[in-house]
Amino acid sequence: MGKLTAAKRKNLKTSEFAEPKERKYPINDKNHARAALSMVSKHGTSAEKAKVRKAVKKKYPSIK
């Protein structure tokens, strides 16, 4: 997984996040999408989990 520095994260489009309004859980590549799923499963609410799963499935259908 490529390192996502603060500067790179700031330059990501809003659409590159699973929760775009809060700019949480970047899903700019498959590795970050997998990391977002992992992090939300540990720390997210039920609503966040659903949003992140839906965003990842839409962008990367091959990730289960």
Image: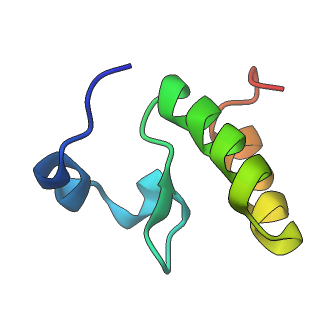
In the picture as drawn, the residue positioned furthest to the bottom comes out as: 21
Can residue 52 be seen at all in this image of the molecule? no
Q: Is residue 44 left or right of residue 17?
A: right
Can residue 38 be seen at all in this image of the molecule? yes
Q: Position of residue 30 (x, y in %)?
A: 54, 25
Q: Position of residue 20 (x, y in %)?
A: 50, 70
Of residues 19 and 60, which is closer to you in this image? 19
What is the quadrant of residue 64 in the picture? top right
- The type of colouring in the image is rainbow
As displayed, is residue 46 above or below residue 30?
below
Tag count? 0
As displayed, is residue 6 above or below residue 46?
above
Q: Is residue 46 left or right of residue 38?
A: right
Q: Position of residue 44 (x, y in %)?
A: 73, 63
Q: Residue at x 69, y 38 (%)?
A: 38
Q: Is residue 38 left or right of residue 49?
A: left
What is the quadrant of residue 19 in the picture? bottom right
Of residues 53 and 13, which is closer to you in this image? 53
Q: Residue at x 27, y 54 (%)?
A: 12
Q: Residue at x 75, y 68 (%)?
A: 48
Location of the N terminus by quadrant is top left
In the picture as drawn, the residue positioned furthest to the left comes out as: 7
Q: Position of residue 37 (x, y in %)?
A: 70, 42
Q: Residue at x 66, y 31 (%)?
A: 60
Q: Is residue 54 left or right of residue 33?
A: right
